[in-house]
Image: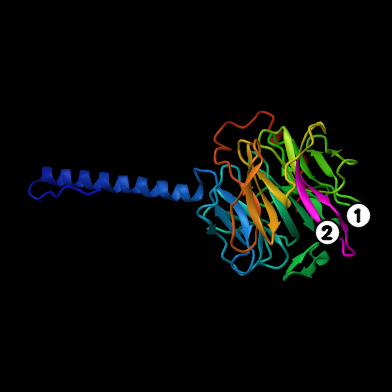
Amino acid sequence: MKRKPISPCSGARDYIKFTILSYAISTLFVFSSSIAVWAEDPETEKIAFVSKRDGNAEIYIMNPDGSEQINLTQHPAEDYDPAWAPGGKQILFSSNRDGPFDLYLMDADGKNLQKVFKSSKYRRGPTWSPDGKRIAYAQANPQKAILLFGARFVPSTELTLYIATPTGHTAEKLTDGFDPSWSPNGREIVYVIGGRKQTPLGIFDLQTRTRDILLPRDIPWILDPTWSPQGDKIIFTKLNGAGFNAQGFLTFQKGTLHTVNLDDMGLEQITDELSSYNPTWSPQSKEIIYNARSGTLQLYKMKLDVGTSTQLTHDGSNSSPDWLNPNTLKVSPSVHSLTTIWGKIKTD
């Protein structure tokens, strides 16, 4: 945007020069601001995921077709569990950069990183409420952690489900379990019920503080439940050859993806060719991205209506995808949102 040269002759011409210069500066400011906003709040769908291609676990983002893969964290610590905030301005994730695994927030471009909680606990697997005002996660005592694979992890049997504000000022204990996923209407959380004999699928009602168990006899060993954006289905990983070892860690031979309706009906197997887990829905619920292991752990995208998959990643080991819908908070919140029934809060 070039200004037309003006000779300094009269007051009128000086005024014209000042006006044009002001317009140019204002236009440049607007243009620069739009770039900054785009960096903090993506306008298109993005996938956040974990990659170990550089030797340790880092948070990356990419387009849904696998292009433009960018490392956001670039830190020697282990970074896991990325979760997009509704609307995409921030990413919540877990890291052991300050000791035991805990939750951190960063902008969508990797800047302005901050720890969520002041108190030090073991916290993993976060998910956001649909209005962005609360988070759910699994918590445990850091002293229960075991040195494993160069990072400290807590056995699945020791994990407890919590909800909190994303500022970390308040938190509330819900029930034993892990792998939470918030329902689109904000009223319920689907999660894995912890235990030594099985890991069934649980749904916790945040208004009544009660839980239901889905598929306890059909599929007793489950991981990674995720609510569909439309709220009519849950996708999860069915584990084969599963059990707990002596330390309380869940082990299994193979995982396959299934979907089920909320009434326990319509159970459908989605994958079977490779061991697959960690699914995430597209905003329209027509596609999923998931992990599959064939030598190394990679990300695949499947069109659900035809069942065909495309490999998206190839370098190193890649896992834990989360699919951003940038339009999540651009509509008015539902009157049925949990905002008015947040309930009693306990100070963490």
Q: Decide if residue 97 is on the left or right side of residue 245.
A: left
- Magenta residues, start to end: 237-258
Give the label on residue 196, or none. Answer: 1
Q: Is residue 228 above or below residue 336?
A: below
Location of residue 265 (image quadrant)? top right
For the view shown, which residue lies furthest in the left direction?
A: 9
Its colouring scheme is: rainbow
**Farthest residue in the top direction?**
335
Callout 2 touching callout 1 (CB < 8 Å): no
Q: Quadrant of the C terminus?
A: bottom right
> Vertical placement of 42 versus 184: above or below?
below
Residue at the outermost right position: 197
Secondary structure under the numbered disc 2 in the rendered image: strand
Tally of numbered discs: 2
Q: Is residue 261 visible to the viewer in this orientation of the structure? A: yes
Instruction: Name which residue lies at 64% across and 37% down.
Output: 306
Q: Amino acid at mark 1?
A: Arg
Left or right: 190 in relation to 28: right
Q: Is residue 239 magenta?
A: yes
Residue position for label 2 = 251
- The residue at the point 82 percent across, 66 percent down is 143
Q: Is residue 231 left or right of residue 10?
A: right
Is the residue marked by circle 2 packed among few (<14), some (14-19), or many (20+) residues within 10 Å?
A: few
